[in-house]
């Protein structure tokens, strides 16, 4: 009888224990499910926002806003910079008001002073005001983590002190002269015979201030095409095309190069190195040779 009583009490205790534990477990599972749902919703929202802020590769004009009257885009640029998107990464080039700002850093001032910090070096830009006056100022290529969101940029001036600022990039629109990518055609597709021709070319990229002389002279030989490219500046010392380096073919006047053109109409990615700045600087461009403008050279 005593054993039966003890057994009954154990069963009763277990029943009471599980009766109280199961609701607690249910509440815990419910809370966990709600937390996971909240995380998933937040992730979905973040991914959606990222998707909305992704631009196709190309060159855009965009607003560059800051929190300072001392740090802003040159008045000749109407508050805008040149936004370049390549492989999903965004960089905006802005021309400032003078040469007072020596360096920039994307992040806080305290981190700019740490070893290994990626300090942005200035470029020397030429700006022209509404009255026709031209001036040289410093410009910077600034990585942009996201559109329409403030991010930290620190600056250092001639006094050697770093300052924190907030900046944002918004309202990107295709840059003037930006052309759509087309399906490329070769000299063979166009049945071009060996000889000398001219073609119109569109240059995109960089600060938007450089250009190439048009029409461009091209030579067709054994199905291959070579373009004689004359820049608007004498300060380019080499070009990179498809990973191969091409040096200047002239010693006087604007920089001239002879580069291969695999296809017309499609965009050809090239890099040009300029020595106009304090240190040599490689700048990425695209060239697009319009097949509809090809004519035999006179």
Image (cartoon, rainbow, N blue to C red):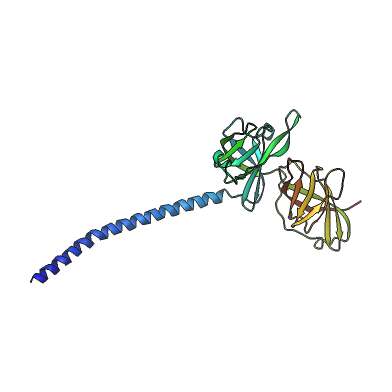
- In the image, 191: left or right of 69? right
Give above or below for 104 relative to 129. Answer: below
- In the image, 220: left or right of 6? right
The residue shown at (14%, 65%) is 9
Residue 7 or residue 117, whichever sits in front? 117
Residue 183 seen in the current view: yes
Residue 31 or residue 141, whichever sits in front? 141
Residue 291 seen in the current view: no
Q: Position of residue 294 (x, y in %)?
A: 83, 53
Residue 162 or residue 281, whichever sits in front? 162
- In the image, 87: left or right of 237? left
Name of the residue lying farthest toward the front: 115
How many marks can you see? 0
The residue shown at (55%, 51%) is 51
Name of the residue lying farthest toward the top: 131
Q: Position of residue 79 (x, y in %)?
A: 64, 35
- In the image, 5: left or right of 15? left
The quadrant the N terminus occupies is bottom left
Q: Position of residue 236 (x, y in %)?
A: 79, 46
Name of the residue lying farthest toward the right: 298
């Amino acid at each position: 009888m005593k054993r039966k009583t003890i057994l009954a009490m154990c069963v009763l205790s277990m029943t009471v224990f599980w009766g109280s534990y199961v609701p607690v477990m249910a509440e815990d599972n419910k809370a966990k499910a709600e937390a996971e749902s909240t995380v998933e919703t937040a992730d979905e929202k973040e991914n959606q926002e990222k998707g909305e802020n992704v631009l196709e590769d190309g060159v855009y004009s965009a607003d560059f806003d800051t929190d300072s009257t001392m740090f802003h885009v040159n008045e000749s640029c109407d508050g805008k910079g040149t936004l370049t998107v390549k492989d999903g990464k965004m960089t905006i080039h802005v021309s400032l008001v003078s040469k007072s700002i020596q360096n920039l850093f994307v992040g806080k001032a305290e981190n700019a002073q740490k070893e290994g910090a990626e300090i942005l070096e200035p470029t020397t830009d030429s700006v022209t005001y509404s009255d026709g006056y031209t001036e040289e100022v410093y410009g910077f290529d600034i990585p942009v983590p996201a559109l329409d969101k403030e991010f930290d940029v620190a600056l250092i001036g001639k006094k050697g002190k770093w300052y924190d600022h907030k900046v944002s990039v918004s309202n990107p629109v295709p840059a003037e002269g930006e052309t759509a990518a087309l399906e490329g055609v070769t000299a063979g597709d166009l049945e071009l015979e060996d000889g000398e021709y001219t073609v119109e070319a569109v240059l995109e990229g960089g600060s938007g201030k450089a250009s190439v002389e048009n029409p461009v002279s091209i030579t067709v030989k054994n199905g291959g095409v070579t373009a004689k490219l004359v820049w608007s500046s004498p300060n380019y010392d080499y070009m990179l095309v498809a990973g191969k380096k091409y040096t200047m073919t002239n010693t006087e006047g604007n920089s001239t190069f002879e580069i291969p053109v695999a296809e017309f109409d499609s965009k050809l990615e090239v890099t040009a190195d300029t020595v106009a700045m304090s240190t040599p600087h490689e700048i990425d461009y695209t060239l697009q040779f319009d097949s509809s403008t090809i004519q035999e050279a006179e």
